[in-house]
């Protein structure tokens, strides 16, 4: 069997039916970020595109009979923003040496540091063809590199066997140990951590604060108006240029509201804070948060504790609360490795990056081992 790989500049050129058969394959967990609805909303809302430095360049692989065998989300990037895996030092070093790092090719879900499948096939040979197709595109167009971010560990290992450079990173995830209530989770913690969490939850909702958990048709355009205000306020303060447009939220609200958990905080008749989560078949993914009024511990309540309660109620295996944040450790989110793979076209630069990554992987592993000493859970020894 031979395969051919074809780039397209919009997910609509692949279509919902073709994309969904691979993104939502029966044997795979449901990943809301890989859904046609989510990725199409990013494109049609203008959240990604030439004006944002995220140019869609998705791949599909066909067999000898011209049947589509797989797809791959891929973007031509003019910068490294919105990726949550940092290669700015690589770009600086390569360009100081006279090279041109940008544009680069990136397989990822834009603005989303969540692990998932990236080479969407039901056949390992077709998966290999997609990865090689991305490499060949880079070589043909004199593009410096191809990056696959937050891919699953099995596909990460297969890329390593094909000569891609392997990188590890750290996030904090909450794991559901078949808890039947939030109190059952708390009972697994040390006494001090358990008391701290109860105090934080109590203090967060003092006064007239009401917390609403909304999903499906409970979410209205009014909720999106308020949430977008929170999102813009936080984004403008943290990174200067928020990525998602207002119409993006309306689009996902129309097409995948049953995969969204919106946690909104109301003081009287006025919304003051909110967080958006996306619901998978195994995992609740925490994404964006914002507030316009400071309340002690409200961020922890809305983003971490409400997510844990929802995951327990839904029987979800884990909560991934996004990138960074050692403060998550004391609240039951333990360090976990995440993975990326990198193809570097220039042999000399590839060797230098390879040496760096060898040391970085060791450091990440040692850091996780160190952080586990501060687990809030009761000692099992």
Image (cartoon, rainbow, N blue to C red):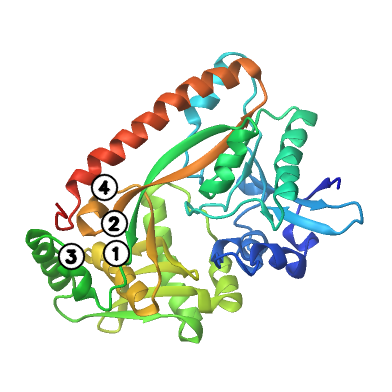
Contact between marks 4 and 3 (CB within 8 A): the answer is no
Q: Is residue 253 above or below residue 325?
A: below
Q: Residue 311 versus residue 129: which sits nearer the camera?
A: 129
Q: Is residue 321 above or below residue 263?
A: above
Residue bearing the label numbered 1:
304
Classify 10 Å Cα crowding around label 2: few (below 14), some (14-19), many (20 and above). Answer: many
In primary-sequence order, the first of circles 1 and 3 is 3
Element under disc 3: loop
Mark positioned earlier in the residue sequence (1 or 4): 1
Marks 4/2: CA distance?
Answer: 9 Å
**How far apart are labels 2 and 3 at the CA level?**
13 Å
**Residue 285, x across and y down, in percent:** 43, 63
**Looking at the image, is mark 4 or mark 3 earlier in the sequence?**
3
> Marks 2/1: CA distance?
9 Å
The total of numbered circles placed on residues is 4
Marks 1 and 3, how far apart in space?
Answer: 17 Å
Question: Residue 219 placed where, x, y %?
Answer: 47, 81
Whether residues under marks 2 and 3 lie with C-beta atoms below 8 angstroms apart, the answer is no
Name the residue carrying label 3: 188
């Amino acid at each position: 069997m031979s395969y051919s790989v074809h780039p397209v500049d919009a997910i609509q050129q692949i279509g919902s039916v073709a994309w969904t058969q691979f993104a939502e394959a029966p044997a795979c967990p449901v990943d809301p970020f890989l859904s046609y609805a989510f990725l199409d909303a990013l494109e049609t809302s203008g959240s990604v595109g030439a004006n944002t430095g995220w140019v869609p360049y998705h791949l599909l692989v066909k067999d000898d009979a011209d049947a589509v065998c797989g797809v791959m989300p891929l973007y031509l990037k003019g910068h490294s923003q919105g990726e949550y895996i940092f290669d700015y030092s690589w770009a600086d070093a390569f360009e100081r040496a006279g090279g041109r790092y940008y544009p680069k090719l990136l397989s990822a879900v834009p603005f989303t540091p969540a692990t998932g499948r990236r080479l969407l096939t039901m056949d390992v040979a077709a998966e290999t063809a997609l990865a090689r197709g991305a490499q060949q595109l880079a070589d043909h167009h004199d593009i410096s590199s191809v990056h696959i971010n937050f891919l699953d560990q099995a596909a990460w290992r297969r890329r390593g066997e094909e000569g891609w450079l392997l990188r590890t990173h750290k996030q904090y995830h909450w794991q559901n140990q078949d808890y039947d209530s939030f109190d059952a989770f708390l009972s697994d913690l040390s006494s001090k951590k358990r008391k701290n969490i109860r105090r934080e939850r109590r203090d967060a909702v003092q006064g007239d604060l009401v917390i609403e958990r909304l999903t499906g048709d409970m979410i209205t355009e009014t909720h999106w108006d308020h949430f977008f205000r929170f999102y813009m306020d936080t984004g403008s303060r943290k990174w200067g240029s928020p990525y998602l447009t207002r119409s993006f939220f309306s689009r996902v609200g129309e097409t995948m509201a049953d995969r969204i958990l919106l946690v909104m905080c109301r003081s009287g008749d006025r919304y003051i804070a909110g967080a958006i989560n996306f619901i998978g078949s195994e995992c609740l993914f925490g994404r964006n948060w914002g507030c316009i009024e400071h309340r002690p511990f409200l961020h922890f309540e809305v983003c971490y504790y409400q997510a844990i309660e929802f995951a327990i109620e839904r029987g979800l295996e884990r909560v991934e609360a996004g990138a960074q944040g050692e403060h998550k450790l004391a609240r039951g989110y333990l360090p976990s490795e995440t993975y990326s793979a990198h193809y570097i076209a220039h042999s000399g630069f590839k060797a230098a990056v390879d040496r760096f990554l060898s040391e970085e992987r060791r450091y990440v592993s040692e850091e996780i081992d160190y952080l586990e000493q501060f687990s809030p859970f009761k000692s099992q020894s």
